[in-house]
Amino acid sequence: MSNRTILADHDIPRQWYNLAADLPHAPLPPLGPDGNPVNPQALAAVFPMNLIEQEMSQERWISIPDEVLEIMLRYRPTPLHRARALESALGTPARIYFKNESVSPTGSHKVNTAVAQAFYNKAAGVKRVTSETGAGQWGSSIAFACSQFGLECKVYMVKVSFQQKPFRKVMMNTFGAECVPSPSSETNAGRAILAADPGSGGSLGIAISEAVEAAVSDPSGRTRYTLGSVLNHVLLHQTIIGLEAKKQLAALGERKVNQVIACVGGGSNFAGIAFPFIQDKINGSQIDIIAVEPASCPTLTRGPYVYDHGDVAGLTPLLAMHSLGHTFMPDGIHAGGLRYHGMAPLVSQTVMEGLTRAVSLQQLECFESALLFARTEGIIPAPESSHAIAQAIREARQAKEEGKERVILFNLSGHGLMDLNGYSDFMEGKLVDHELSREALAQGLTCLEGLPVPASR
Amino acid sequence: MSNRTILADHDIPRQWYNLAADLPHAPLPPLGPDGNPVNPQALAAVFPMNLIEQEMSQERWISIPDEVLEIMLRYRPTPLHRARALESALGTPARIYFKNESVSPTGSHKVNTAVAQAFYNKAAGVKRVTSETGAGQWGSSIAFACSQFGLECKVYMVKVSFQQKPFRKVMMNTFGAECVPSPSSETNAGRAILAADPGSGGSLGIAISEAVEAAVSDPSGRTRYTLGSVLNHVLLHQTIIGLEAKKQLAALGERKVNQVIACVGGGSNFAGIAFPFIQDKINGSQIDIIAVEPASCPTLTRGPYVYDHGDVAGLTPLLAMHSLGHTFMPDGIHAGGLRYHGMAPLVSQTVMEGLTRAVSLQQLECFESALLFARTEGIIPAPESSHAIAQAIREARQAKEEGKERVILFNLSGHGLMDLNGYSDFMEGKLVDHELSREALAQGLTCLEGLPVPASR
């Protein structure tokens, strides 16, 4: 009768899976300003050494510390649901499963890495962490995690989001963290922007610059910076999602998953559910792994694989990744978590190696799918997650046309209770689809000129 | 290592517990306008007969239909958490457990009865249900439940709340329900109010009048009214909370619970967790059962036990309950779900029979407790639930003073992600405590003059 599969606490995975150990080609290293691979020591002012080691690790399995497991066990293992009501509404022969990451303390998968990062920072003697946040999902998660380990936390939130989404700041404050709008007058980076443009609404790139500066310039040397996606160690921490899903599907007797689907912005929720299945694919299983991005920010489907900066100001190391150019400014779609010019290097590499198939969708189809999902499965998804749902529905409809069974798994990365203004705009007919023009695309890519090019294989 | 206890799906309770079967004295019947007990047939235009039978049932155990279980199994059994981090912060020898009802599709316990009511209405051939909502927690829950059973749903939302909390309307719309501000121009009751006061902000009493009128005046005869608290059948549906908690505590080897704590507005989340333990108390166990209400709306602690109407306009039958008078207007505290002049008759009777102890708390202490809870246990509680938390903290501190172990169980009735404006006001120092004056209390009680008095025992 039940359509929800829960794992016993003692069945929670005790190791993260590191895809870097199994990729056909070794990942390309990040490059410093001199064009040479970055030395771990060069990052020591930004991240604690234990996380830098994880970032560069080639170990296949990395143990999850007990202290991290203990906090994750408050909401994990998360449920795996069979979406029978959705299947029924679609009349599909496909069996659709979704992993429900919306049950975490802040309503999304972001908590998984936030807890781990807070733990490693604490273990390294760090007193205070800084970070940036766009829509606020990551900022509230790192705030939660810091409250658990007694770390101070300061979040630079993109000013337009800070003004539009005041409740995310309240969440951070409730967990004891400080949240200021960026650009702020507290950093050189922020002051420079404000001097040039006092009315600046900020950007993720500016906020990253402020958070990094605030970390490295602390005279006590006990502040470090944290990031919610893109980097290898962040993706690593999310693999618990896919590892749990595998156990749950096995418990249901599902031996073969045909398709694994997740949305991609920076790449972390996708990596979380997909990487453990990509390991199977590398080992010979036929699985269709699908990364779904918004048509207005089509990093994987229209961006080249290049060396580019992670931030607008060009302060971060150069990463080998798909990118629309670090100066690219996407349209203001409601799936704010997917508006990022780059893509996690490991995710980019799975696309280059033919392990992941990337597709892009328009937001109207995604909201339409989200409504169908809410009215059948009863959970209001985050606008980001609705991209995965929309693709799952496309695949289920195709299965119906073919008259063939298939098993589809997607990641419900979070709920949409903090994003109801997007639903309101959609239901009132205020949203439209935007096709990214060739000109806008070309303009974003101009900033890549002169940067190193990844070696061909 | 884990502080969360989950029950297997097959351990979900399959019967609700009806306290009416075990109370030392039979509950007093509702009275009609003529002062005589209401005939079930007289309610048939308002509720379907299957729910009217439940409302009047004296059966101890009532089976939960499979269709209701199937939907509840998407989020139930809900977790029972040991609040070890909170215990540690308090330095208490008490073991504090809480039942986490915040994991439901709309974030609170309200869904438990919404699903059952939608099922019974559907089974009775009803096509459309109406209801009212204040802050929107109930409205979004009945909207969710109706989407699951293919029922149309229309919710009259108190206009001031409709304007202050627009996202609750969006939630209802997302689930396919209609939500209009009350007073509306769609009913005689609404039009009469608007004619007298075009700028009326509405009240729960007015919204009830509109929802009832809309149900009984549907010429097709296939619309019925639903209510989210107070009535016996609503409380019955919530007892799954306490029944699950008992199983979970038993699984942990906790043989003896010393205190069971919940907040009370209409009484349904309190009844849900407490009634199964009150059965034990009636059978001889020593358990301290505590109902916590806001000092600004102290129905149980300062209201007399009387026959009063459930709505401001006096359209409902007279219920034997504690009441501050149906014209009483409480202060605008953030715990909107606790601002009700009356109390569920069954809950009132447990107080009269000495089975429940009622206490009242001020909102500053509740928000202070909510912050401590968020920063230790990592869940931001609803302002209503914070009353239960505050009392649990008081009890845990007393245990510390006494240097004695005790087992405390409270109900976390919902999360506060839709109520962050209250947290914001609190952290900015904008909230104050209000002591209800003797004059304001006396004024509310004047409306009770001339109403029948419950027979003494």
Image (cartoon, coloured by chain):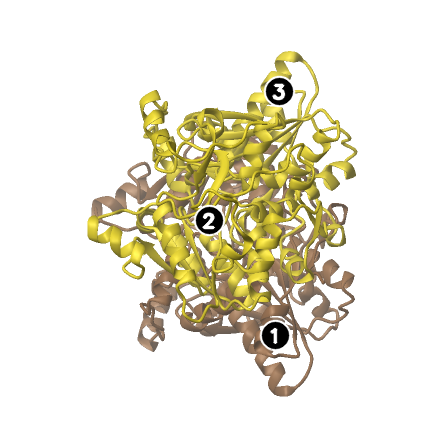
Chain colours: A brown, B yellow
**Which numbered tag is attached to residue B137?**
2
* Quadrant including the C terminus of chain B: top right
Q: Amino acid at mark 3?
A: Gly
Q: Is residue B178 visible?
A: no
Q: Which quadrant of the view contains residue A261?
A: bottom right
Q: Is residue A228 above or below residue B49?
A: above
Q: Amino acid at mark 1?
A: Ser
Secondary structure at badge 3 equals: loop
Query: Is B290 displayed left or right of B438 in the figure?
Result: right
Mark 3 vs mark 1: give the one in front. 1
**Residue under pointer 3:** B91
Q: Is residue B215 above or below residue B108?
A: below
- Give the camera-side residue of A23 and A407: A407
- Give the camera-side residue of B435 and A93: B435
How far is mark 3 from mark 2, CA to CA? 34 Å
In percent of width and height, residue A349 lies at 58, 66
| Chain identifier of the residue bearing label 1 in the image | A
In percent of width and height, residue A88 lies at 61, 74
